[in-house]
Amino acid sequence: MDASLHAERLLSTRRSGYSLPQGFYNDPMLFDVDMKILFHHDWLFAGHTCEIPDTGDFLTFRAGAAEAIVVRGADGDIRAFHNACRHRGSRICQADKGSVPRLVCPYHQWTYDLDGRLLFARDMGPGFDPAGHALKPVHCETTAGYIFVCFAEAAPDFGPLRTRIEPYLAPHRLEQAKVAHQTSIVERGNWKLVWENNRECYHCSGSHPELCRTFSDGPTVTGVERADSDAGLRAHWDRCNAAGLPSAFSISDDGQYRVMRAPLLGDTESFTLSGRPASVKPLGGVAEPRIGTLMLFHYPSTWNHLLRDHAISFQVTPLGPQETRLTTKWLVHEDALEGTDYDVQALTEVWNATNDQDRRLIEQNQLGVNSPAYEPGPYSPDHENGVAQFVDWYCAALSARLGGSKRLVAAE
Ligand code: FES
Ligand SMILES: [Fe+2]
C-alpha cells in the first residue's frame, strides 16, 4: 500500500485527546513517512556553535539516510553539506567531530574546500568541470549558539524561530560556553514516545526522585496551558524580566516550538542533588541568582534547559520504528575549569539518572503499545495537555504535508 495513503487512513481513525493509533508507534512504513515528511522537512538541532569554534572544525549530524557535515569556514561562518562525495558518493567525514584543513574523501581523495568547492580530483580527463561537482549544501542557520540544519530542498523560513527564541537564549551567551560532558543513550521506543514522555510531568513524582528535588511537576510548567494564570510563574517572569531576561510563556502559532522560564523549587538554583550551582562561573555572567530554568522545545528534534550556571541540550534522533537515540550535552562557561569551577559528577548526575529512568518508562511504554490489547488511551487534561499538544502538532504537520509526500513516494 502507498505509505502516505496508509498514514492518512490511520490519521483519520485518530481520536483527539487520546494517544495515537498503534501503527504510529511501531509500523516501519509510518516510520519512513515520519522521516521523509518531518525529519527531512523541518529545521533540526544539529549542535552548538561552541563545539566548532575554529576554522576547519566540523561535526556530523545524521537524520535517517541524510547526513550533514557542519563545518566552520575560513571566514568564520558555519555551513553544512551533505556528507556524500560528488565522485561516487562515499561518506567523506566519518567522525562525530574533528578538525581538518580541507574535506578529503577517503575513497579516491577528491578534495573540497571548507566552503564546499571541489579543489582537487585526480585524472578526471580534459572535459571534467570541478565547478559542477561541489558538495551539495544543506540549509544551515545559527541562533544564540544553536546550529540548526534542514535537509529539505526548500527550507521553511527560519526567521520566525529566530525572532521568537533568540531574545530568550541570547543572555546565556552559549557562544562562549563549552560542552563539559555529553552522553548518547539508545532508547528502545518510537521517537514520539520519547517526546510524549518529555511533554508531561504526570510521571515525575513516581519516577524522578533526583529531578523532583529541584523541578516542579506542576502542569503549568511542563504543559502549554494556563501558564499565564499561574501567579508563581508570573512573579518569576516579572523578576527575571526586570533583570533583562525575557521569560514569559511564548509558543509559535503552529505549536512547533515554545520558550518559557520557570522557577526551581524553594531556594534551589540548579539541577543538582544539593540544589546549589554545579558551576561557579555563570553563563553569560547572569547576575540574578535564582532565574530557574529557561525551557525551549522545538519539534521534532530538541528540548533544552538553560540555567544560570549551566545549560543542557537534548537531541532526539530516530534510529528505527522502535529505537531512538537521545544525546544530552551539558554546557558551562568556556572559562570554567573542571575540578575547580565545576565537578562533572555533580553537574550530570540528576539528568543522567532522569534520562535512564525515562528510558525505562519509554521502553515499557513501547512494549505495552505493541500488545494486541493496546488501544489509544485518554490524556489527563490537567497533566498531559503538553502531550496532547505535541500529538496535535504531529498530526497537523503530517496531514498538511501528506500531499507533498505522495508525490515523493510516487517518484521513488
Ligand atoms: S567516492 Fe569520493 S573520491 Fe571517489
Ligand atoms: Fe521523565
Image (cartoon, helix red, strand yellow):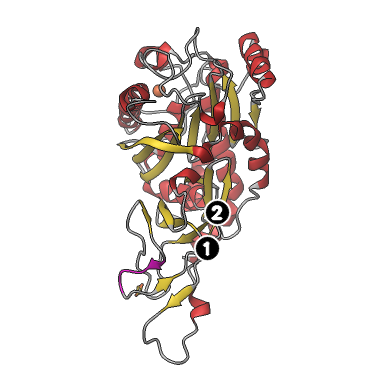
Residue 104 lies in magenta, yes or no? Answer: yes
Write down the residue under mark 2.
140
- Please tell me in which quadrant of the rendered image residue 231 appears: top right
- Which residue, as the protein is rendered here, is positioned at the far bottom? 126
Disc number at residue 354? none
- Please tell me in which quadrant of the rendered image residue 371 appears: top left
* Residue 251 at x, y percent in the picture: 64, 31
Are the residues at dot 2 and dot 1 in contact (C-beta closer than 8 Å)? Answer: yes
Identify the residue shown where x is 62% and y is 31%: 168
Establish if 161 lies above or below 80.
above
Quadrant for ligand 2 reads top left
Write down the residue under mark 1.
137
Identify the residue shown where x is 33% and y is 54%: 95
Task: Pick whichever, 162 or 321, lies toward us.
Answer: 162
Provide the secondary structure element on which disc 2 rests: strand
Say if disc 2 is inside 8 Å of ligand 1. Answer: no
Q: Quadrant of the N terminus?
A: bottom left
- Residue type of the residue flagged with mark 1: Pro
Task: Pick whichever, 360 or 336, lies toward us.
Answer: 336
Establish if 210 lies above or below 332.
above
* Residue 238 at x, y percent in the picture: 68, 16
- Residue type of the residue flagged with mark 2: Cys
Provide the secondary structure element on which disc 1 rests: strand
Residue 373 in sight: no
Q: Which residues are magenta?
A: 102-107
Kindly report the secondary structure that dominates the magenta region of the rendered protein.
loop
